[in-house]
Image (tube, rainbow, N blue to C red):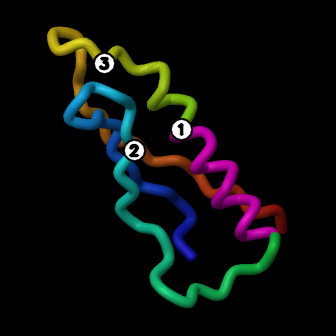
Amino acid sequence: MDTKLEVMLTQTFDRKPLVTVSNLPGLYADLTPEQIRALAAALCKAAEECELQPMGGRHFRQKKRLYDIMINK
């Protein structure tokens, strides 16, 4: 599994927050519970940051972000 989650913070056609994820595991991905939790934490960070972005036309900017997928060893 990648150690970084790559996303684009963007918006829907009606100016609502939207995250486009570039590198989720494919179909039938084998993930341990620890990996699932780490992926979920990175997705939650992306969701929180996306909701904080200004969505108005003049102030909106797409932003590419990388979030660490922290797996305890």
* Label 1 sits on residue: 47
Residue 28 in picture, x, y percent from top left: 56, 90
State which tag comes first along the sequence, 3 or 2.
2
Residue type, numbered disc 3: Met
Please provide the residue range marked out in magenta.
34-46
Kind of residue indicated by mark 1: Ala
Secondary element under disc 1, as helix, strand or loop, is helix
* Three-letter code for the amino acid on which mark 2 is drawn: Val
Decide whether the magenta segment is chiefly helix, strand or loop.
Answer: helix
* Residue 57 drawn at (x, y percent): 17, 15
Give the side of residue 60 with respect to residue 35, left or right. left
Q: Magenta stretch containing residue 33, yes or no?
A: no
Locate residue 63 relative to residue 28 in the image: left or right. left
Query: Which residue is denoted by mark 3 in the rendering?
Result: 55
Tell me the CA gap for discs 3 and 1.
Answer: 14 Å
The 10 Å Cα crowd at callout 1, few under 14, some 14 to 19, many 20 or more, is: some
* Tag 2–tag 1 contact (CB < 8 Å): yes
Residue lying farthest front? 14
Give the residue drawn at x 48%, y 86%.
Answer: 27
Question: Which residue corresponds to mark 2?
Answer: 19
Q: Which residue is painted at 25% across and 12% down in the image?
A: 56
